[in-house]
Image: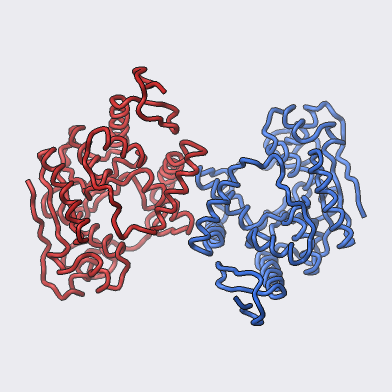
Chain colours: A blue, B red
Amino acid sequence: MKCRVCGKPANINLRSYKTALCEEDFIAFLEKRVSATIGKYRLIDEADRPIVAVSGGKDSLSLWYMMNKLGYVSDGIYIDLGIEGYSERSLEKVRQMADTLRRRVYVFHVRNALQKGIDGVARVIRRPTCSACGTIKRYIMNRVCIDKGYTVLATGHNLDDEASALFGNVLYWKREYLWKKNVVLEGRGEHLVKKIKPFFLCSEREIAAYAIMKGIDYIYEECPYSEGAKTLVYKEMLNRIEESSPGTKIMFVKGYLKMLKEKGDEKEDGRESRYCLRCGYPTFSDKCSFCWLLDKFGTEYDVEFDQYN
Amino acid sequence: MKCRVCGKPANINLRSYKTALCEEDFIAFLEKRVSATIGKYRLIDEADRPIVAVSGGKDSLSLWYMMNKLGYVSDGIYIDLGIEGYSERSLEKVRQMADTLRRRVYVFHVRNALQKGIDGVARVIRRPTCSACGTIKRYIMNRVCIDKGYTVLATGHNLDDEASALFGNVLYWKREYLWKKNVVLEGRGEHLVKKIKPFFLCSEREIAAYAIMKGIDYIYEECPYSEGAKTLVYKEMLNRIEESSPGTKIMFVKGYLKMLKEKGDEKEDGRESRYCLRCGYPTFSDKCSFCWLLDKFGTEYDVEFDQYN
């Protein structure tokens, strides 16, 4: 196999693009796609101050690295879930990257706020661990932007994440979620920051290849709570279809985006916009789920961030 | 495992219904579901004369058998595709069932009409075999109803068929097909007969069990042209999801039906209804695809049916 661009031996075969590329040309190819995604979907304006949600995994660290390389100067936000060993090892990777990029990273420690790790928090509020984690992450990532003046939050969600989540939403026709996914989710004034997914059209495999080629040191372990997650089953299945029909995942996600665009405003759910009386976060009642959580713990704690660099 | 109804040893475990049943109670359970489907979706009126499209496989023969057993007296229509060996063996199973039920079956021989089997026909018109087969089947099944006075055409499509086809339509967002599937497709005057799928909510496994318990002698071979069909890949995958989350297939299909109902008339494609100038079959041009096919073969042939019983 030879590189389609320069003719040197190819390092990666991209069947869905019917091409094969050497390391150098693959890196250029992927960066160009991300750049085009940012441009086409207007993810970042010139006046924006973006921040990247980093977990220590390949997707978020590659995104943080690539955004800075592409000229979108960005800091990072890391949430330490207090999972023994795993959280420390992840934070270490994040710190390394912060040093490489010479960018700041904010760190929120769940254990400082609630005196428990995420599993303990979940037990107290009687929710699945991933549900408690989602509530805290969504809140804190938004909060760091509001508190520290960032205007765009970028997450490392990739094509496989989006396709498998979309797949689950279609399989059970979860209409409250089905038309809510997008490359960009607009913010709401002082309450909610704009969220973007620059890797929306990049597969997990492509990002892993990019991370390896760029020598990005990321944490290989999956989150110990992700085991048995349905999305992993969906990912595997979509990859099997991809194997026999290359390009299916990207067609699935792009086809969805096209339908979404045509649907336009129809996707509004008609519920009134309300904001938490305590902190201003969007909610459907008087109190947002994070403040509700703080109450459950009887804590007067106000959100604080550690700062690295 | 004991039968949930009578306590005798169970013959089949239905995880999606969280139940296990003995042979007798399973048969009653499945027949009741089909009966309820026919009632709920108004598939058959008292004044109707139904006919069943039979292939010799487990689904269509079980449907033909069950409909007659449930009091919906029905004849059959078999299309002999001229696939050497396979077509003869299939017809033999159909004849056996016709004798058991003492009902008539009409037989249309592709080879009599076009002097070729379905593979030869496909080659002449440069279409995939399954595409040529679909064109002929849809036309002939409708035609037998128009010519012989049947008012409803029942096909043996089961839950797995519908879920996998729906899955393919969603995966590629085939909007021209996506909202066209239903338990019942209404007819159009003298041109198009009403089509129904009484097994829409019965899984392949349930129907196979029914056929075996009832001693229905069907053809086990798959159509030789079905190999490698994408729907088989989708079926296998949906069954894997079903394995880990019993009930998924039926939720997927029922959720779809619910959305479809709410969409209502929105699904019209806006194209004007037109009919073939030669035979009256619905078409979007002057000539339907079957008459176009006859022209390709330069034949003046008019559709004829053999009759058995």
- Relative to B227, residue B217 above or below: above
- Camera-side residue: A184 or B244? B244
Classify B114 as above or below A89: below
Q: Which residue is found at the position 89% from the left and 56% from the top? A: A104
Q: Residue at x 71, y 36 (%)?
A: A132
Give coordinates of residue B64: x percent, y percent. Answer: 20, 41
Question: Does A25 sit left or right of A116 as displayed?
Answer: left
Residue A9 in which image quadrant: bottom right
What's the residue at 42%, 51% (across, down)? B166
Say which of A201 and A215 sits in front: A215
Q: Residue at x 37, y 56 (%)?
A: B268
Q: Is residue A237 left or right of residue B162?
A: right
| Horizontal relation, residue A93 to residue B290: left or right | right
Whether residue A301 is visible, yes or no, is yes
| Quadrant in which the N terminus of chain A appears | bottom right
User: In terms of depth relative to the viewer, which is nearer, A8 or B180?
Assistant: A8
**In the displayed image of the protein, which residue is found farthest to the bottom?**
A7
Count of residue discs: 0
Looking at the rendering, which quadrant does residue A23 occupy?
bottom right
Quarter the C terminus of chain A occupies: bottom right
User: Where in the figure is residue B234, as x and y percent of width and height?
Assistant: 44, 52
* Above or below, B35 relative to A234: above
Residue A201, position as x, y percentages in the image: 63, 62
Whether residue B191 is visible to the viewer of this picture, yes or no, is: no
The image quarter in which residue B254 lies: top left
**Image side of residue A79 versus residue B177, left or right:** right
Residue B94 location (% of width, % of height): 17, 47
